[in-house]
Amino acid sequence: MARPGHEVSWGKWAKLDLKGRDILIVDDILDEGKTLSAIVTRCQEAGARRVSIAALCAKRHGRCVPGLHVDFVGVEVPDRYVYGFGMDYYELGRNLPAIYALKETA
């Protein structure tokens, strides 16, 4: 699923045996999905039986990696920078109790 030209450099990879296992990848936000796609591919190459994705947020736009399927989405957000509820904006706002989006610029 990873597109050519988008390489992920793995600092470390889990030493677990994924062969025949069902894997759930949980992410805070699905933007374009390049890194998620690489993780899914790596899990499949390691022999995972099924790989599912859950994302707290998914951005509404048409730039997602072709073929990437997110199984569970908490909320769709506008195609703007979002922060809060665990997601940061320049290391700030991670502890906010809701999700906020930066204003659109003209």
Image (cartoon, rainbow, N blue to C red):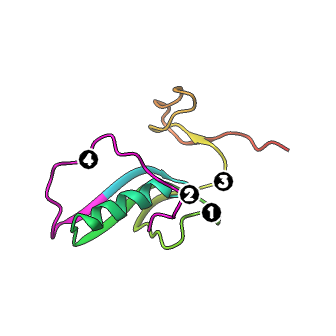
Query: Is residue 15 one of those drawn in magenta?
Result: yes
Residue corresponding to mark 2: 32
At 57% from the left and 32% from the top, the residue drawn is 89
Residue corresponding to mark 4: 13
- In the rendering, at what x and y percent does residue 56 appear? 44, 52
The secondary element bearing badge 4 is classed as loop
Q: Nearer the viewer, mark 2 or mark 4?
A: 4
- Find out whether the residues at labels 1 and 2 contact each other: C-beta distance under 8 Å: yes
The secondary element bearing badge 3 is classed as loop
Per the rendered image, the range of residues in magenta is: 1-24
Q: Residues within 10 Å of mark 3 (few under 14, many from 20)?
A: some
Amino acid type, mark 4? Trp
**Residue 79 marker:** 3
**Residue 10 marker:** none
Decide which of 70, 2 is in the foreground and name it: 2
State the count of labels.
Answer: 4
The secondary element bearing badge 2 is classed as loop
Query: Is residue 7 one of those drawn in magenta?
Result: yes
Amino acid type, mark 2? Glu
Query: How far separated are the C-alphas under marks 1 and 2?
Result: 6 Å
- In the rendering, at what x and y percent does residue 76 appear? 56, 58
Task: Looking at the image, tell me whether mark 4 or mark 1 is earlier in sequence order.
Answer: 4
At 68% from the left and 39% from the top, the residue drawn is 102
